[in-house]
Image (cartoon, rainbow, N blue to C red):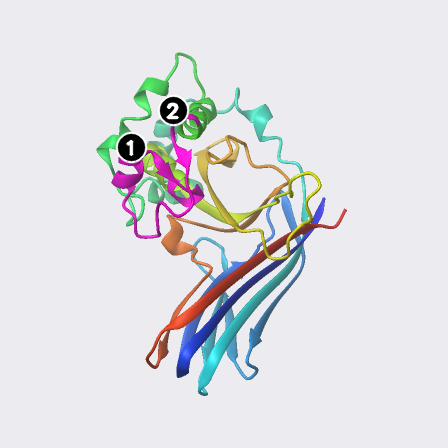
Amino acid sequence: MKYQLKHLTEYVYQHPVANSYNLACLTPSNLSYQRVLSTQLAIYPAGTEISQYADYFGNIRHFIHLQPPHQQLSVISHATLEMLPRHNAERLSSGCTEAQLHTFLQQSKTSAAVYGKLLCQPSRMAPFCPEAAALLPPLRRPGQTLLQLAEQLNQYIYANFIYTPGFTTVVTPLSDVIKYQRGVCQDFALLAISCLRANGIPARYVSGYLETQPLPGQPRLQGADASHAWFAVFDPEFGWVDFDPTNNLLPCQQHLTVAFGRDYADVVPLKGLVQGSGSHQLKVAVDVIRCE
């Protein structure tokens, strides 16, 4: 299954600005279930300096510097991806138990174990929260695998939290999400991550896109898609396995991955600063188009 991605971020400034510095995390990487056929990052106005590097998590980053005065900055990411089946549902009943995971993390000195230990630690947007930690114990069952436990958490968040666009922002604390049981995909991913890490289970934040379909009889609107977020759990046998609590799914071919991190702050699509004053307007438009 092939997809074409387009992600536009556009800033329009009230007054001319200069020395615009931005860091983009918009380019997908090759993964076992995702083949990157082509990518392009277009910057307007022309003359922008761009450099590329890979961060600690393996994400492709672009550093963008536009020095001359300008009143508009557009960053457009294009990509063509081939998505392969993941077969994650078949893994739920196998793999390690929670106790076996803890033994692996304590005894193994492999890079996978070191990476897993890092992602057991709290982060700014996914802190250790007693209310989040308390969600997991009631979901444990005798003979349960680690992935079955993660699926139970996935289902719990979907069933008990209401998807409410606009209720939260990127600075809303996790405690408010738990108190009001409302949020969006980013909040639900961070809630699961906080819960798992507080119980000694490595979890990471995943950013990407989800193919959406218009209602029957309705045209597909250009730019109407959006970024999406979910979480992944580390199993020593299978590696990282993804879960989507917003939709109660195990991500499959319709989930297109861009980046991994400790939380959203590690994978912000575009962030930066400029030299100047005045307000600005921001436009974001995303298209996820199936090619075949």
Q: Is 97 or 272 nearer to us in this picture?
A: 272
Q: Which mark is residue 98?
A: 2
Residue 266 on the magenta segment? no
Tell me which amino acid carries mark 2. Answer: Glu
SS for tag 2? Answer: helix
Residue 110 shows in this picture: no
Q: From the viewer's side, name the closer residue of 279 and 140.
A: 279
Q: Residues within 10 Å of mark 2 (few under 14, many from 20)?
A: many
- Which residues make up the magenta segment? 159-187
Residue 115, percent across and down? 40, 44
> Can the viewer see residue 164?
yes
Residue 281, x across and y down, in percent:
43, 69
Q: Which mark is residue 132?
A: 1
Q: Which of the two discs, 1 and 2, sits closer to the camera? A: 1
Give the x, y percent position of residue 142: 39, 12
Asked which quadrant contains residue 167, the reply is: top left
Between 52 and 184, the one lying in front of the other is 184
Q: Using residue 86 as the reference point, say whether residue 193 is left or right of it.
A: left
Vertical comparison of 285 with 174: above or below: below
The residue depicted at 77 percent of the width and 46 percent of the height is 292
Give the residue at the far front of this rendering: 217
| Amino acid type at mark 1 | Ala
